[in-house]
Image (cartoon, helix red, strand yellow):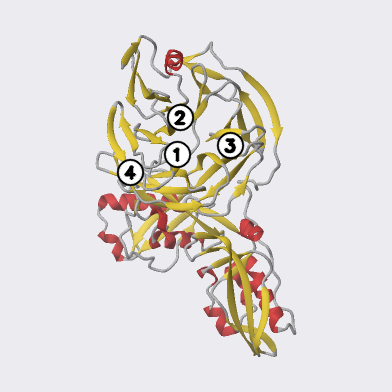
Amino acid sequence: MKKLIALLAILTLSGCAAIPTGLDVKSGPEIAASEQQEVAYYTPSGPLEGATPREIVSGFLAAGTGPQNDYAVAREFLSRDFAQQWKPDNQVLIRNGAPTFREGGPGLQMVAINVQARLDEHGRYSSYEAADTTSLRFKLVQQDGQWRIDSAPNLTVVTPPVFQVVFKPYNIYFLDTRGSDLVPDLRWFPSRASTGTRLVNALLAGPSEYLMLGVQSAIPEGTKLTIGAVKIQQGIAEVDFDSVALSADAINRRLMLSQLRATLLQLSGVSDVVLSVNSSRQDIVPAELSPARSGSEVLALSDAVYRIGPADSLAITGTANLVQFSNPTLLAGARSGNLLAFAGPDGVELMVGSGIGVQSQRISKVSNVVSLEFDSEDLLWIVPEQSGSDVQVFDGSNQVASLVLPVIGTRISAQLSPEGSRLAVIVKNKGEVRLEIFTIARDVRNNPSTINPGTIIQAPLQSPVSLTWQSPVTLRILETSPRSSSLTDYPLFGPRVLLPTPVVRGAKVVAGQATGSSYLLGTNGELWNLIGGSWRRLQSELTDIAKLR
């Protein structure tokens, strides 16, 4: 079915139309720490004279809160020889509850730790649904008449509040399967002089397991830092690789530098990155790649489609007739400015604007749709609710892919990541609700070819109804019970953060343009904006909201 509507281009704004609006500001509880909070360190105390073996071990564990000067205070609890051997960066245990001490004999202390999460040497965070009990063994000797630790695990132990203060999230950047977009891999490190080195070593070590099928690196496998460190001088991070890096061709060398720049420019005070091989400076122009952002303008569906601005909303010309005719429940908009899509009881309809008017065409008969969105290539993705139903992808009115989503269960909500190489899905199967992430492979024409097997990020969830990519490495999930709703951030991977409680029961959440901001559509049709820890009522009488992608 086609119909030509002789109107202006699809995203021309009509300044005289607006949906009902209001201005109600309410504050929720400030549970989450500010994203702009600066990293601060605790100052642990060194060993006391005459301390017992248990007091030495307890003080050593407490000193894991101070990474300053390569954990200098913690090393004071160690014997002179072992202080040079201990490697605190190998692992971090995040404990739940107090440790239990037991003497295993003269000079031997055993400590039981209930571990709720841990970091590996490359900053990868893994958590446990139930605390995992780990036993740590410490051997002590007399040195100058004082007990000192002569053997201990290469790790530190912190509590969740200490972790939130001492450790900071950083993204390690890889490339998608086409080498055309940067894909972030979240890691956690304390901010200190060696952080740049740890970031590059994490990049060289490769991606986290859930990304392995969906990303690549332009840095040749086996490449190493020549001096084991990244130097930062006058705002320039100097990376010196060994000769293995020379096996990369000219294109990959540009991509290699782009990965390094995106990774190292996160460091405070770093403004540029230079790459050398065996101390020989490489004259490389980085590829024109930059990390994707999650925030964008928001569209609202009511009696027409509206663009939500900071002060008002403006109707998009040509959409009122289609809304009235099709009775849609979902919408999607392309950032390029001439594409809209609607899902309703009769299927999915596409509107294409041009200089002479707007053309509308039904492109799919799928009616029960949980996700409708455009990617960065202006391809329209349709994710059906029913388990086993293929994900449909359209380029205009032409279907370019029918993709198997390798998961069993009813889909509740789904959304593509900002760069389009990952798909987050909330799925329900046999009463269990979980969040899974899938990577996406694309062919030489940039069309998706495969959705790779997923990784469970969080299970079980209680009553989720919607998710959004709040950042390229954080999913914000809306859960709604019969009486109330909650919003929670789930980093990939890291400790989850509970956000201010929504003022109304929520039906859908969409990331806003400002950092930490979100739009929430209530079950009553009201639109609320969370920004700065406060909820602000914007509109009413809405059916759906969507990011302009």
The 10 Å Cα crowd at callout 3, few under 14, some 14 to 19, many 20 or more, is: some
For the residue pair 313 and 275, the one nearer the viewer reads as: 313
What residue is pinned by disc 2?
A: 548
Say which residue appears at 63% left-offset and 59% top-offset.
Answer: 160
What residue is pinned by disc 3?
A: 517
Residue 404, x across and y down, in percent: 33, 43
**In this picture, residue 302 sits left or right of residue 166:** left
Q: Nearer the viewer, mark 4 or mark 3?
A: 4
Q: Nearer the viewer, mark 2 or mark 4?
A: 4
The 10 Å Cα crowd at callout 2, few under 14, some 14 to 19, many 20 or more, is: many
Tell me if I can see residue 478 in this picture.
yes
**Mark 2: which amino acid?**
Leu
What residue is pinned by disc 1?
A: 415
**Mark 1: which amino acid?**
Gln
For the residue pair 506 and 180, the one nearer the viewer reads as: 506
Q: Decide which of tag 1 and tag 3 comes sooner along the chain.
A: 1
Q: Nearer the viewer, mark 1 or mark 3?
A: 1
**Mark 4: which amino acid?**
Val
Residue situated furthest front in the rendering: 430
What residue is pinned by disc 4?
A: 404
Q: Decide which of tag 4 and tag 3 comes sooner along the chain.
A: 4
